[in-house]
Amino acid sequence: MPIECHVEITPVGQERFHAVDKVVMGHVFDIHNTLGRFCDEGIYQEELAQRCRADGIEVQREVLLRALYQGFAKPYYLDMLVERGVIYELKAADSLNTSHQKQLINYLLLANLSHGKLVNFRPGSVESRFVSTRLRQQDRETFRLADGARKGEDQTSRLLRETLCALLVEWGVFLDVNLYREALLYFLDGPDAGVRPVDVVVSGRIVGVQKMCLLNAGTAWHLSAVRERQKSYETHLVRLLGHLQLEKIHWINFDHRTITIKTLNQ
C-alpha cells in the first residue's frame, strides 16, 4: 500500500462531524479557561483526549501514517484522530497560518478523509479553523506531466524524470511537495548527488554558498509548488543559476494536476 496506517480509518459524514466537534470544542474552551494559554501542545492534547474519552468519544493520539515506496518511508503523526474519521491538529502558536492549513490538508489527503480542524490554544481566546477537502484518492491519481527536459538529457536527468513519474503514479498529486523532494533525494543517490553547498560567485568573488539538490557536479534540480507568477519565479531561478558553478537546473513545479519539468541552462 502506498499509504500505511495501523489504525482503521472510517470517514464520517458532515452531520456527525459537527456533532462530535460541538463536544470537542466545549472541552477545548474549558481547558483554555482552566490551564490558560501558555502550556505546551502535548499538555493540551493529553487533557483534551482524556476529557473526550470520558464522554464516550473515541480518541487516538499521535496516529502514525507512512507514505511508502520501494524502501522509502516518510512518517506523519496526527495529533488526534477522533471517532476514527476526524483529524484535529492542536497548536500552541502565535496564530494559525496557511502552513498549518496546508499541513492538515496533507494529512486529510493521506488518510483519505474529508474533515478536520485546527485548534490553537496560545492566543488570549481560542482560535480554530475548519479544514475540509472534496478530493478523494482516485481524484489525485489523474495528472498531466509537461516535460520539457528530455532533449539531450543524460542518464542522471532521465533517472530524475523516471523516478518522479513513478512517485506520481504511486502517490498521486496534491500532497505536500516536501514528500516528493525527500523521496527523490532518497532514490537519486550518488557520489555527487544530494543536498550540497554550491559557491555563489558575484564579479569573480565567492560571496557564500547555496545549498542545492544536485544530480551530479554540474546539474541541480529544484522542486516547487508555484501556482501564480510562475514566469517571475523562473526569472529568479535563472538569476541564481547565473551565479552558480553549475551547467543547468531542472525545475520541477507542481501546479494542481499539472507537473512541469523545465531545464534552465547557463
Image: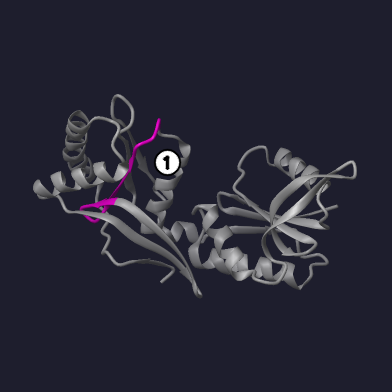
Could you say where residue 156 lies in the image, as x and y percent from the top left? 73, 70
Q: Is residue 13 above or below residue 69?
A: above
**Colour scheme in the image?**
one colour
Frontmost residue, 117 versus 49: 49
Where is residue 216? Give x, y as percent. Answer: 75, 66
> Is 266 displayed left or right of 164 in the figure?
right
- Image point 17% across, 53% down: which residue? 58
Query: Outermost residue, right direction?
Result: 204
Of the 4 image quadrants, the one containing the N terminus is bottom left
Which of the 4 image quadrants contains residue 132?
A: top left
> Which residue has dot 1 on it?
101
The one of 43 and 126 positioned closer to us in this rendering: 43
Q: Is residue 114 above or below residue 196?
A: above
What is the secondary structure assignment of the residue under circle 1? helix
Task: Tell me the amino acid under the disc marked 1.
Answer: Gln
* Left or right of 78 on screen, residue 188: right
Q: Is residue 89 magenta?
A: yes
Q: Residue at x 76, y 55 (%)?
A: 249
Query: Which residue is found at the position 15% from the left and 47% from the top?
Result: 50
Instruction: Find residue 184 and report its horizontal and vertical position in percent.
Output: 60, 64
Residue 101 appearing in the image: yes
Q: How many marks?
A: 1
Q: Please determine whether, in this image, residue 105 is positioned above or below residue 5.
A: above
Query: What is the span of residues highlighted in magenta in the rendered image?
Result: 80-95
In this picture, is 68 found above or below 89? below
The percent position of residue 149, horizontal first and vertical second, equals 75, 61
Q: Residue at x 47, y 41 (%)?
A: 99
In reply to whether residue 78 is colored magenta, the answer given is no
Identify the residue at the far top of this view: 124
- Residue 14, can we see it? no
Image position of 123 (left or right of 161) = left
Q: Nearer the viewer, residue 147 or 63?
A: 63
